[in-house]
Structures are given as structure tokens and as C-alpha cells.
Amino acid sequence: MSVNDHPTEESSLERERTPKSFELFPTIISKLLEDGKLQYPDFEKLEELFGERVQKAIDSLTSLNVKKYLFTPSGIIRWVVIGSSGREYLLLSHSFCSCNDFLFNSLLRRETPSCYHLLAREIAELRGDFEVIQLSDRQYSQFMLDKFSF
């Protein structure tokens, strides 16, 4: 059996050090709140962490693909981002997206802190760059079933 047959302690530690979206977003958001925009070094740091997901997030914003669903009278809020394929993805808080990229590359492999949908949602919320859709509380159960059906 060779040394390469088993993950090294270092590679396991490297995966453990990959920051999670809920750890990164407060820092990113506070930076955006300081002056309302990202400076080039901030953009480079985002690209270092998220790779091509940064450009995809920006494309989502320019395509108006970020939706905020507001249920009344309860005030429950759910976010949806329409992906490049046209599929809608449900986002919960700063820490979950229903897309495969988030499941496989963020949660399981820990290769990236987040998918581009979560990044797009954070930036859209900060900038107020999203569509608000109001639904009644009676529509909530069906909404959740629709967004989580595979």
C-alpha cells in the first residue's frame, strides 16, 4: 500500500480550512456596506475563493434572476435564484442552496465556500437589486413543494 492510497492529514486539514458561505458573507457584506461597491482587490479575493462563480453571480444580477418571495401576513421570506439553465433554486438564509454545485462542491467536497446563487443573493439583497413577489401564507406549502421537487 502506498502513501498515496490514503488522504494525507494535510489534505484533510486543507479541506477543513475551506471557509463556509455563512462565515464569508458577513465579511463580504460589511466590505460592500463601507462604500457600496467592491474594489478590484476585493473582486480578486472573491475570484480566488469562488472562481468563475463570481462572474455567474454578476450575470444573475444583470439578468434580474434574484427573487425575494414575501408571504403575507406572516412575513416569511424565501429567496430564489434562477440559474443559467433556467431552473429555480431555493436559498435559505446565508447557508443553503438547493443546487447540485452547493451540495457537491460546498458541502461534500468542501472545494468552494458557496455556489454562485448564494453569492448573487447576498449582493442583490445588499444592492436592493431583486424582484419582490408577494404570495399569501396559504400558498407557502405548495411553493416549498415546487422548489424542492426534483
Image (tube, rainbow, N blue to C red):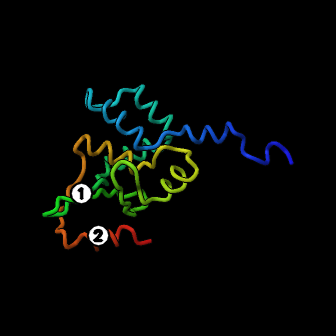
Task: Give how far across and how far down residue 123 sits, in percent.
Answer: 31, 42
SS for dot 1: strand
Name the residue that disc number 2 marks.
143
Residue in the picture at 19% in, 73% down: 138
Name the residue that disc number 1 marks.
77
Residue in the picture at 26% in, 45% down: 125
Task: Give how far across and how far down residue 93 sits, in percent.
Answer: 33, 51
76, above or below 129, in the image: below
Kindly indicate the quadrant of the structure image that contains residue 85.
Answer: bottom left
SS for dot 2: helix
Task: State which tag comes first along the sequence, 2 or 1.
Answer: 1
Task: Give how far across and how far down residue 41 sits, in percent.
Answer: 42, 25
The amino acid at mark 2 is Phe
Q: Is residue 99 left or right of residue 62?
A: right
Kindly indicate the quadrant of the structure image that contains residue 68.
Answer: bottom left
Residue in the picture at 57% in, 41% down: 16
138, above or below 36, in the image: below
Q: Is residue 123 left or right of residue 106?
A: left
The amino acid at mark 1 is Ile
Numbered label tally: 2
Q: Name the outermost residue toward the left.
A: 73
147, above or below 14, in the image: below
88, above or below 112, in the image: below
Residue in the picture at 66% in, 40% down: 11
Quadrant assignment for the C terminus: bottom left
Distance CA(mark 2)–CA(mark 1): 12 Å
Which numbered marker is on residue 19?
none
